[in-house]
Structure formats: C-alpha cells, structure tokens
Image (spheres, helix red, strand yellow):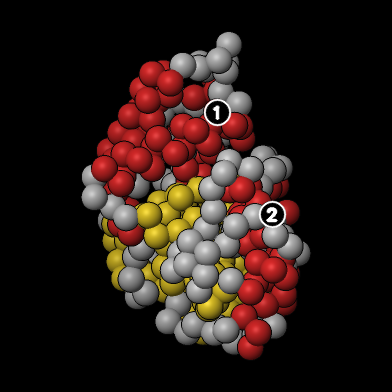
Amino acid sequence: MTLTDARLDELADHMHEAAMSASPVPMLSLSNDGLDEHTAYTLQRKLIGRRIEAGHRLVGMKMGLISKAKMQQMGVHSPIYGHLTADMLLENGGTLQKSAHCHPRVEPEIAFILGRDLEGPVSPAQALLAVEGVCAALEIIDSRYANFKFALADVVADNASSARFVLGDTVMHPADVELGNLGMVMEVDGKPVQIGSSAAIYDHPANSLAAQANMLAARGEKLHAGQIVLAGGATAAVALEAWQRVRLRVAQLGTASFSVEA
Ligand code: OOG
Ligand code: MG
C-alpha cells in the first residue's frame, strides 16, 4: 500500500509535534505499511519543511549509522542521513536543556564545512576537494520513538534522530590533518566514556561525505557551499543526564563541549 501525499503530510505534522513537545510516539512502521526507505525520505523533507516554515534555516546535513559501533547499538545496518537547521546548533561550551528532549544521547563526530557546492556522483577524494574546513563535533541525538527503538524507515522519517550539535572552535583544512585516523576521546565529567578514531567513521570520514552527496544525488539534490556535514558517530552514543559536562577531544582538532541542565 502506498502512502498518499496527504497522509505523509499528516505524519510529518505528527513527527514535528513529537519533536517540539519532546513526547515519544510509537514507531510509524507499526501502522503504516507503505513506509519504505524512499517514502521515509520524502516524509523527512516535509518534516524539515515544518522547521523552515517556522523560520529556521537549513545549515547542513548529517550522516548516521556509518560505524559498526552505531549499527550494532541501534540494530539498523544501513547508513542514513538527516537535515540540520540553525536552531539545532548549540554553541561550543553551551548548555543543553534535557527537558526539551525525549531521551537525549551524545556521540563523538567530525564535521565538514563546505567551501563549494558538492553534487554526486563523487568519489571520496573528489568530495574532499569541496571541503574548506574540518572540526571536532558532538552530536546530541534524540529519537522521537519510545525507548529509542526504530527500524530503518522510522529513523529516516524522524530526521535521523537529529536534535542538537556542537562544533569545536579549531577548524583545519582537510589536507593539514590526518583525517583518516584521528584519536577521539569523549569525556563525561572529566572521565573518558568512549574512545575511538575517525577511522571508525565509514573507514574514513571522506567516505561519509561522498555517501552523503551520492545519496542526495539519487534524489536530484546536492550539498551547498557553506553547509556543514556531520560525518557520523565514531562510537556508540551515550545517554545524557542532568548536570553532566561533556567534552570531546580530537587529535589535531581540539575540543568541543557542552553542559547538561535539567
Ligand atoms: C540514528 C542517528 C545516527 C549517527 O551518527 O550514527 C547518527 C540514531 O542512532 O538514533 O546520528
Ligand atoms: Mg550522529
């Protein structure tokens, strides 16, 4: 059964409302047979349209489920993408309000900042040519589904669990860092909770950027100069609690951090 455009609009309103009110909902796939991956991206586009209508600019994209650790943690084994809007950006060192989210988690990432438009099909090496800078990033994800459980189409229809993200202040040109193997240590209250490497990000973060451009190209879309692309979590995500201080240290790229309040 295919889902009508009117039904997809209804579902987009429903998922938008779940995000805005921080109230988890049952998985859409339980009651919408026609929700396949392709349809879920159409729904995601409508969902992000709701944020843009509310005055929030599109600032970039994110890849997800590109490391073994993340795939295993979530039980979903194919890469996905989501959209990032300006209101999702949390300043480095800023404060996250836990009650504004359902059950937020944090994961260590690398972000790309594009100097030029990037349109697939591209190879990882070609994709890197469009990059002006790379930096450390923390992504705060928050599934709008009960118990943080979902199937592939569900998470796509929930904008890939996107909630907030923090960018580090050190921005390097990709040619000046060993992008394929940067040590990454994520600390909570000064103690390491996840230790990894950028090598876990799709074997190399450039693979993630190329995959993003290529997945968009399959829908006739592209990345734009100035956009940010989060390359995906290098390790499993960690649940956040009020009053924690989270910091990511990445070799050659400095730190990104935030605090959690109730
Ligand atoms: C889906 C989003 C995954 C990543 O970096 O792997 C993601 C989720 O785990 O809820 O952002
Ligand atoms: Mg992520």
Residue positioned 31% across, 44% down in the render: 51
Crowd around label 1: few <14 · some 14–19 · many ≥20 (10 Å): some
- For ligand 1, tell me if the residue under mark 1 lies within 8 Å: no
Residue 256, x across and y down, in percent? 45, 75
- For ligand 1, tell me if the residue under mark 2 lies within 8 Å: no
In the rendered structure, the answer to whether residue 170 lies left or right of residue 2 reads left
Please report whichever mark, 1 or 2, sits nearer to the chain's N-terminal start.
1
In the rendered structure, the answer to whether residue 94 lies left or right of residue 146 reads left
Q: Which mark is residue 120?
A: none
Residue 80, x across and y down, in percent? 60, 46
In the rendered structure, the answer to whether residue 79 lies left or right of residue 55 reads right
Q: Residue flagged by tag 2: what amino acid is it?
A: Pro
Residue positioned 26% across, 43% down in the render: 53
Q: Which mark is residue 121?
A: 2
Look at the image and tell me in which quarter the C terminus lies.
Answer: bottom left
Q: Residue flagged by tag 1: what amino acid is it?
A: Thr
Secondary structure under the numbered disc 1 in the rendered image:
helix
Residue 185 vs residue 53, the one in the foreground: 53
Residue 151, x across and y down, in percent? 60, 32
Residue 64, x across and y down, in percent? 59, 52
Crowd around label 2: few <14 · some 14–19 · many ≥20 (10 Å): some
Residue 184 vs residue 205, the one in the foreground: 205
Look at the image and tell me in which quarter the N terminus lies.
Answer: top right
Residue positioned 71% across, 42% down in the render: 77
Secondary structure under the numbered disc 2 in the rendered image:
loop
Residue 192 vs residue 48, the one in the foreground: 48
- In the orientation shown, which residue stands out farthest toward the left? 55
User: Vertical placement of 69 versus 247: above or below?
Assistant: above
Q: Which residue is mark 1?
A: 39
Q: Whole-Å distance between the Cαs marked 1 and 2?
A: 22 Å
Q: Is residue 79 visible?
A: yes
